[in-house]
Image (tube, grey):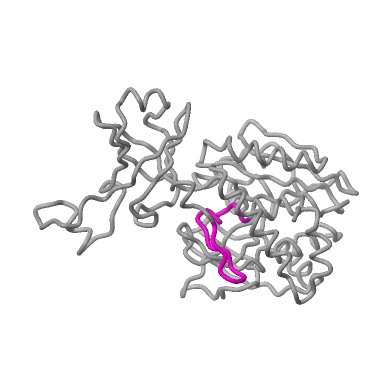
């Protein structure tokens, strides 16, 4: 099924949203399988440019590597942006041993024990090669340094390495060097369907980019100009969003994000999206949040509300630095955030409906 069918399915599925979920699952799967480590996002850029342009939208990549599509509104004197970051967490090569072993460190909020020992994709300047994330043998005594990982401490990046079995010459020919990005192997990133849930690496934030694609397909003549921004380098400081908001005047910025399911937050897994009031970077705009609540009510969608820690978004970071006067974050509940994540496809679909309602209203 194509993205073009989303709108009619949304309007006609009623209590049987399975068709919507099937479309979303396939779209997210396609996005997940396009590698996009922070700062090396060309693979997904090409895909998104083709998708947006095929819909007839004005589309471009700005100097900060954001992929942007503009939907003209009835009032071109006003504009909002909706962002979903396209980069993903992973690792970065720190040094290379003479035997081809790579020492790597985190890129964004990643942990080696999340991925476990297994195949990693190493993004060279000339080609992508594979290596094995390794923690060392288990059949050891306290004379071996990895014994403490079995009994006392979690594995850190400093304790792990990537075996390539390549010579230095072979690595050089592939363009692998300090600074090369390392990701969990693409074949290990295949999303998995659990009834109405999707389980996958990098739902943060490929599922949000799927929402942008749905809006690009379905949003017709919003009340104001809408910029759909697949933002770059969010996981390392919202760099793309900061550049965009510094250069584009906006009435408001809404970030699409995952939201962690944890016992410390009043967030329930399921199909109800979450609207944030505060995160690590500060407060969101209460008046903009009130408008989003009204839009959700019109769409007959119940929102959850939360303040969370250890989290930031394009919107909160841009607002903190004074690039936008009003910012909000609409998110979907997600288990195992920054790991093998699990989210209800209905929550993702409902984010689309809330934003369709918001962009069609005279706020």
Residue 220 locus on image (x, y percent): 86, 52
Residue 275 relative to residue 120: left or right:
right
In the rendered image, the vertical position of residue 125 relative to residue 226, given as above or below? above
Does 19 lie within the magenta span?
no
Residue 326 visible in the shown view: no
- Which quadrant of the structure image shows residue 285? bottom right
Foreground: 199 or 339?
199
Classify residue 77 as left or right of residue 284: right
Q: Would residue 197 be counted in the magenta stretch?
A: yes
* Residue 241, position as x, y percentages in the image: 62, 43
Q: Position of residue 136 (x, y in %)?
A: 22, 50
Q: Quarter holding the N terminus?
A: bottom right
Seen from this angle, which residue lies furthest left? Answer: 143
Q: Position of residue 254 (x, y in %)?
A: 68, 55
Residue shown at 25% from the left, 48% from the top: 159
Residue in view at x 48 percent, y 26 percent: 126
Q: What stretch of residues is rendered in magenta?
A: 191-207
Q: Considering only vertical position in the picture, is 283 above or below 30?
A: below
In depth, the one of 110 and 247 nearer the eye is: 110
Query: Measuring 68% from the left and 41% from the top, which residue is drawn there?
Result: 48
> Along the horizontal axis of the image, is 226 left or right of 93?
right
Q: Is residue 162 visible?
A: yes
Instruction: Kindly identify the residue that appears in the image at 59 percent across and 46 percent down.
Output: 86
User: In the picture provided, is 247 more to the left or to the right than 224?
Assistant: left
């Amino acid at each position: 099924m194509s993205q073009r069918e989303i709108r009619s399915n949304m309007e006609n599925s009623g209590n049987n949203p399975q068709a919507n979920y099937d479309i979303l699952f396939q779209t997210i799967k396609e996005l997940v399988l396009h590698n996009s480590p922070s700062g090396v996002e060309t693979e997904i850029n090409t895909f998104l440019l083709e998708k947006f342009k095929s819909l007839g939208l004005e589309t471009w990549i700005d100097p900060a590597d954001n992929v942007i599509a503009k939907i003209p509104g009835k009032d071109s004197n006003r504009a909002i942006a909706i962002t979903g970051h396209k980069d993903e967490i992973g690792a970065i090569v720190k040094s290379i041993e003479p035997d081809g072993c790579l020492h790597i460190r985190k890129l964004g909020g990643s942990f080696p024990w999340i991925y476990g020992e297994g195949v990693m994709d190493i993004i060279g300047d000339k080609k992508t090669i594979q290596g094995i994330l390794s923690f060392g043998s288990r059949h050891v005594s306290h004379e071996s340094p990895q014994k403490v990982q079995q009994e006392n401490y979690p594995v850190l990046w400093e304790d792990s390495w990537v075996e390539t079995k390549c010579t230095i010459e072979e690595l050089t020919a592939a363009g692998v060097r300090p600074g090369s990005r390392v990701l969990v192997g693409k074949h290990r990133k295949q999303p998995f369907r659990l009834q109405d849930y999707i389980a996958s690496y990098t739902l943060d934030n490929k599922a949000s980019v799927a929402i942008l694609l749905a809006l690009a397909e379905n949003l017709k003549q919003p009340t104001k100009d809408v910029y759909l921004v697949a933002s770059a380098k969010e996981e390392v400081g919202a760099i793309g969003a900061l550049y965009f908001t510094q250069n584009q005047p906006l009435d408001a910025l809404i970030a699409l994000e995952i939201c962690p399911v944890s016992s410390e937050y009043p967030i329930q897994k399921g199909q109800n999206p979450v609207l944030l009031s505060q995160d690590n970077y500060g407060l969101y705009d209460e008046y903009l949040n009130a408008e989003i609540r009204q839009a959700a009510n019109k769409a007959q969608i119940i929102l959850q509300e939360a303040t969370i820690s250890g989290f930031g978004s394009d919107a909160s970071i841009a607002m903190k630095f004074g690039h936008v006067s009003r910012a909000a974050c609409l998110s979907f509940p997600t288990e195992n955030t920054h790991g093998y994540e699990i989210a209800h496809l209905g929550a993702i679909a409902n984010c689309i409906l809330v934003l369709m309602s918001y962009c069609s209203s005279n706020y």
